[in-house]
Image (cartoon, grey):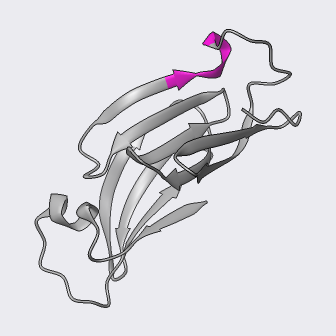
Amino acid sequence: MAIIADYNNAFFDSLGMEVDSFRHIFLTGHKDGKVHLWRSDAYIGLLTDYRDEVTCMTKCFEGLAICTWRGYIYLWEETLKTCTKIIELSSLPFKILSFNITAIDYNQKRLLVLSIEGDVI
């Protein structure tokens, strides 16, 4: 899975690179837990390496939300320099059928998370 940040987004500012209007930043999440940063014309580097499969990502109010198969949501600030918060589904005060996250969406200032068993959180 991948997510795209436009050239005028804060992601580019944090890289300190000269860009033109035709370049974008791509973030790709992989089964091995790695999240890579790409520019439209070159590989930039590794953002992070989680121990679990990266299942989904979305842009959100914090900057970026990255989810893993084991039920973790990592919130990164918009310059991608730090992970500001980690949410573990197993620590929520209510019961859910599965911690395996399959999709996430940012809608009306809320993160909507879907598990493999159909939980919507």
Going 25% across and 52% down the picture, which residue do you hit? Answer: 79
Residue 30 visible at all: no
Q: Is residue 19 visible?
A: yes
- Give x and y (percent) for residue 112: 66, 42
**In the rendered structure, does residue 10 fall within the stretch colored magenta?**
no
Vertical arrangement, residue 6 with respect to residue 94, above or below: below
Q: In the visual, does 22 lie left or right of 4?
A: left
- Span of residues in magenta: 87-91
Q: Percent position (x, y) of residue 103?
A: 70, 47
* Quadrant containing the C terminus in the rendered view: top right
Q: Residue at x 35, y 77 (%)?
A: 24
Q: In the figure, residue 77 lies in which quadrant?
A: top left
Q: Quick check: is 88 in the magenta stretch?
A: yes
Left or right of 52 on screen, residue 14 = left
Left or right for 35, reference 73:
left
Residue 84 screen position, x and y as percent? 33, 31
Main secondary structure type of the part rendered in magenta = helix
* In the foreground, 109 or 102: 109
Image quarter of residue 94: top right
Residue at 38%, 44% in the rendered image: 62
From the viewer's side, name the closer residue of 107 and 118: 107
Relative placement, left or right, of 110 versus 35 is: right
